[in-house]
Image (spheres, grey):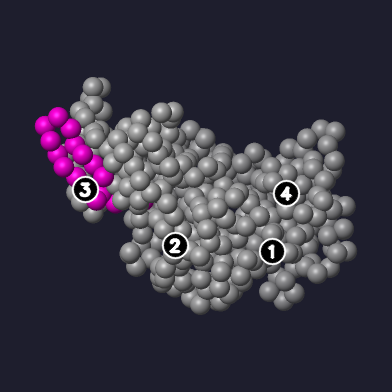
Amino acid sequence: MHNITLEAIHRFPVKGFPSQSLKNARLETGKGIPGDRRYAITNGTVSNGEWMLARSYFINAYNDGLQNFAIEESVKDGCLRLTNPEGREITLQPENPQSLELANLQLERFFKHVSVKPDAPAPQIIERKQAESNWDYPNTEISIINTETVKSVGKTLGHEMDPARFRGNLVINDLPAWEEFGLLGKRMRLGEAELEVMFPIVRCPAPGVNPETGERDIDFAKVFPDHFGHAYCGMYATVVKTGPISTGDRIEIVGDAKMSLTDAQAEADPYPLWPRVMEVSDYVVDVMSTRLSLKNTCPWPLPEAKPGQRLKLHLGADQWTREYIKDADSNHYHLEIEDSKTGDPVTQMLREDLQPGQKIIVSGPFGKV
């Protein structure tokens, strides 16, 4: 594994609003970064005090203008000051319920720059201090973004891209693009904390919002499926050992996750959809076809596959294809790749240009037998 380092730490005190950059943080088991997504603003729903779906709140995936607000934390007393595009301010004082009540009385006027559903309950700022916070799923305390993957996406689009678009808590570097999928099911240490990597992050339209301008300038609903053959970027992780972390920390893989696959996929998309890293274990080029065997690198078993189903192989931007699975077991997929009748260059790469030990991103299996 590469010498992965922690480049940046971010928390998002108010869901959907800009982040705060931190040099240090203390991760707590099951709780993530203190103060992350502590507050959220309802969009016509009524909070019942429990965790709710992301669509219950104003978020960048569906609401424009949130990145044009500003957020500042007082070093002296920990108060959060929110400022709207007109310069109007409201203040939230942690541990002071009256400040939240006062902020909500001012919220309608403060929040007029963001569209509100007609005839819906008035937006309300809600506070959640328990472990579940206002994350996208109840158990996804930490999100991880790889800078090299972001560069790959930007290069493909011809658009310089800030990792801030992807709203990750931990931004890592020194890992080749997309190889964060190889962290799946692993336990990693940074600083004195330890995390277990659960599942990849499916991308909604939120990264289409430019964090500098607040404008939606990229259609991410199309970008990932069209160019990469999947809709994932980044990984979710859960904190399993409390401890401080700092930017510059080296990230070390210390073993396999103790959580089960059943636990990891409880809230996620179906397992076959997850991109994951496999290794070329056998590669024999013949005149008529190439026999390709791919070995699982994840501690969890491969999704069950039957002959006749197809596997997606993701070799890079605009370089992905589907190939039939000839045979499979819990640790390998075996394929027999013939020349493409349509002249697909990716199939030709699979036929001639791989090496044993090479890592490949795959997803699937897909299709009926």
Q: Nearer the viewer, mark 1 or mark 2?
A: 2
Q: Residue at x 72, y 41 (%)?
A: 114
Q: Position of residue 124 (x, y in %)?
A: 81, 50
The N terminus lies in quadrant? bottom left
Q: Nearer the viewer, mark 3 or mark 1?
A: 3
The C terminus lies in quadrant? top left
Residue type marked 3: Asp
Q: Is residue 80 above or below residue 226?
A: below
Q: Nearer the viewer, mark 3 or mark 2?
A: 3
Mark 1: few/some/many CA within 10 Å (<14, 14-19, 20+)? some
> Does the magenta segment cover residue 279?
yes
Mark 3: few/some/many CA within 10 Å (<14, 14-19, 20+)? some
Q: CA distance from mark 1 to mark 4?
A: 13 Å
Q: Position of residue 339 (x, y in %)?
A: 20, 28
Q: Position of residue 323 (x, y in %)?
A: 31, 33
Q: Which residue position is annotated with label 4?
A: 52
Q: Position of residue 146 (x, y in %)?
A: 43, 56
Mark 4: which secondary structure? Answer: loop
Residue type marked 4: Met
Q: Which residue position is annotated with label 3?
A: 282
In the rendered structure, which disc, 1 or 4, sits on the residue that comes first in sequence?
4
Q: Is residue 187 above or below residue 125?
A: below
> Does the magenta segment cover residue 308?
no
Residue type marked 1: Ala
Instruction: Give the magenta part as a residue range.
Output: 277-293
